[in-house]
Image (tube, rainbow, N blue to C red):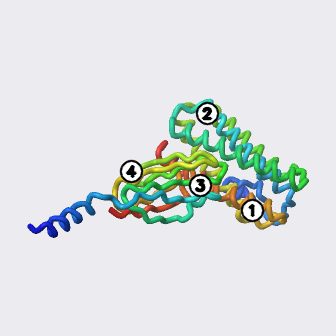
Amino acid sequence: MTPGRIAIALMLAGLSFVPAQAETIQVTIDRLEFAPAEVKAKVGDTIEWVNKDALVHTATATNNDWAVNIAPRQSGSVVLKKPGAVDYFCKFHPNMKGRVVVAP
Amino acid sequence: MFVRLSAGIAALCLLSAPVFAQGAKPSDPQIAHIAYTAGQLDIDAAKQALAKSKNKEVREFAQEMERDHAEVNKQALALVKKLKVTPEDNDTSRALTKQAAAKRDELSKLDGAAFDKAYVANEVAYHKTVNGALETTLIPSASNGELKSLLQTGLKIFQGHQQHAEHVATDVK
């Protein structure tokens, strides 16, 4: 292997180890609605729900992967650990629905 | 004919509260009174459930009813104060109160799983009735925009409660 090739190989190896910058994605809760209702994210990203209502809400994954309690006028968050699409709802007001699509 | 008619009326009364009479359009002070009363009655029902039930899911539901209806009523009081509206007692509020008292009395005689089942079933029915009234009578009749908007948000909250109650009902069967 020439030094040049080694450098390229190291670079490629390095790329696969450096994760893309994790982001925090905000979802607002206002008058019993998650907005945006659907968000796209990557594994490692954080979803932060900002509750503008004076009511307690939850973001509860239908597959039980996570459940977040969100106090009135507070926020709550979850770090996404698994890829896939997750539907969630508020367990107190099940007419509130949202979805997170998590890329690997 | 008369018998049939009264049987029909009786059936209607059993189905949906006779309280929400057709025809007469309630005024804003009456609507405010009805909405506040409906919330307060559900808080009272929740208090009874919290005193009697040992079921975790039922208690959690009752706590939610107490919390949410108290918050909505707090907002309703703040709004009527701001609008300088004095809530006005009326036949619908009185009928709701009377029915709730009868139900509370009935539930007081039950315990354990029988109480849980009856309380949750009534919560489903009660929210259905109140939501129906909000949709067909109270919201369309409200003339003040802010009152209408509060009732609309209230309806969304109570539709959530109804769905939650329906879910709990399948668990306490």
**Mark 4 surroundings within 10 Å by alpha-carbon count, few (fewer than 14), some (14 through 19), many (20 or more):** few
Observer-side mark, 4 or 3, equals 4
Residue B157 percent location from the top left of the image: 64, 54
Residue B101 percent location from the top left of the image: 73, 39
Observer-side mark, 1 or 3, equals 1
Tell me how far mark 4 sits from mark 2, CA to CA: 30 Å
Label 1 vs 3, first from the N-terminus: 1
Say what secondary structure mark 1 lies in.
Answer: helix
Label 3 resides on the chain identified as B
What residue is shown at x 51% (from left), y 54% (from top)? A48
What residue is shown at x 68% (from left), y 55% (from top)? B129
Does A46 sit left or right of B46 as displayed? left
Observer-side mark, 4 or 1, equals 4
- Tags 4 and 2 on a common chain: no
The three-letter amino acid code for the residue at tag 1 is: Ser
B5 w.r.t. B48: above or below? below
Residue carrying label 3: B160
Tell me how far mark 2 sits from mark 3, CA to CA: 20 Å
Label 1 resides on the chain identified as B
B136 w.r.t. B19: above or below? below
* Residue B149 image label: 1
**Mark 2 surroundings within 10 Å by alpha-carbon count, few (fewer than 14), some (14 through 19), many (20 or more):** some
